[in-house]
Image (tube, rainbow, N blue to C red):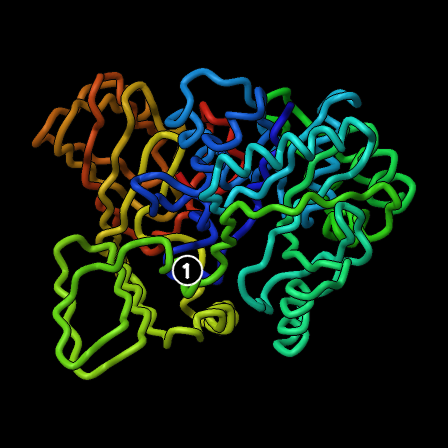
Amino acid sequence: MTNIILCGGSGTRLWPLSRKLMPKQFLKLFNDKSLFQLTLERNSKACSNFLIVSNIEHYFIALDQLEESFSNVDSKFLLEPMPKNTAPAVALACFALDVNDIVLVTPSDHLIKNEDEYMRVLKRAEALAKEDYLVTFGITPKSPQTGFGYIEAVGEDVKLFHEKPDQETANRYLKSNSSNDSSKFYWNSGMFMFRVGLFLAELERYSPNIYKLAYEAYLSARGENPIRIDTKAMEKIPEDSIDYALMEKSKRVKVVPSDIEWKDLGSFDALIEEIDSKEAIEIESSNNFYYSDTKDKVIATIGVDDLIVVDTKDALLISKRGKSQRVKDIVNILKDSSQLSTLNSQLMVHRPWGTYEVLIDESGYKIKRIIVKPNKRLSLQKHFHRNEHWIVVSGTATVIVGDKKYLVRPNESTYIKMGEIHRLENEGKIPVVLIEAQVGEYTGEDDIVRIDDDFKREYGAI
């Protein structure tokens, strides 16, 4: 069985922890593991192959975390140049597989704590998938949540899919579950299992435009692993969820009731139930949650209760418990402000060759700490608007400037003039750590021209 993992979420409701270039599924908040890694580990017990559908910007983060979890696993990536929701994503993935394959489709950002029960419901779903049903997983609700869609079913037979309800309707759903009514209501998990050929046939029947344009986009793809979908072809595909495009229309749908301690960590109110609060000095304060990505920062409060405090190096969020869903309103405000950069990335940015952290960013200059992994190198590149000074702190850097190649050791430095072609490489066995000082009239990350790149990146920063 193949696990199709959908990694396209942006996780904006967990800003400022989650950013466009480092969304929530890749944040290592669970004993130094991410939700994506937990998904890989959990599903590897039932699936022998992975097909990971990712935004092209997240490919190298996902690849790094996959390799951390499994050094040798049968996996493939399909890279989308833009999000088009789950129906096109699953269709593109299925075109890359054999029509007889059974696939488990899962988001990358869910938490499942009862793995024994999870394995049991997967086996039941697999049996139904082999009988040519499109199987969805209905989560047994513990409370009247308004943030989830619901599935109404009699046994395993689906009656209706319901939109996210208001509070009164959610209360009625939960009350109905405790009555003798044959219909039961479940949270819609967004997880599915089916045979590839059945899914594609049903999608062609009920959403022929998505099927046709997704197939054309798949035929336009480049590469075998990763499979890179063409931007212009992707733009033509309608945006739609698998529920709207297919599951609500097909007559071949079954639901497996699942009591698996499932969590969709879509808000801080949900997240803080699963991670520990940072220690704080509290005076006349109670029921507060604190998070800070600065290890030694002291947090102290006086006379405040029921707060969620999330502190990062470039942003601070303070919310009342129960109100954190409104983080999306803050994100919408930031989209139209001069602070747009805080939505895209943290000060620590991950790249396929390592990481960089912005220490100072002022008009006319920028200071970074750069870490290059062993046997990795940056692209051969040049800049039009800045000069760069590199000071090596540890490790030994191999530097190419023009037609010269030389080593720069700890406590040594080098200088790259504006317009010079250059490259930084780590040929050693330990990370190279250096401080980069950029000086120029413009120090934006898009001031870069790549001449050669090991990672075949077509756009973006270093």
Q: Which residue is under mark 1?
A: 341
Quadrant of the rendered image containing residue 401: top left
What SS does tag 1 mark?
Answer: helix
Question: In this image, 353 relative to 196: left or right?
Answer: left
Question: Which image quadrant for residue 417?
Answer: top left
For image coordinates 36% across by 38% down, the residue present is 419
Point out residue 438 in the picture as x, y percentages from the top left corner: 26, 47
Q: Is the residue 275 above or below the residue 289 in the image?
A: above
Position of residue 356 in the picture relative to residue 249 (left or right): left
Q: Position of residue 91 (x, y in %)?
A: 75, 37
Residue extending farthest to the bottom is 303
As drawn, the residue found furthest toward the left would be: 411
Residue 365: where, in percent of width, then height?
A: 25, 54
- The quarter of the picture where the N terminus appears is top right
Residue 249, compared with residue 415, is above or below; it is below
Q: Nearer the viewer, residue 172 or 93?
A: 172
**Residue at the location (16% across, 81% down)?**
284
- In the rendered structure, the answer to whether residue 415 lies left or right of residue 201 reads left
Q: Amino acid at mark 1?
A: Ser
- Residue 390 point in image, percent of width and height: 20, 36
The part of the image, by quadrant, that contains residue 7 is: top right
**Above or below — where is 109 with respect to 413?**
below
Q: Residue furthest front?
A: 180
The quadrant the C terminus occupies is top left
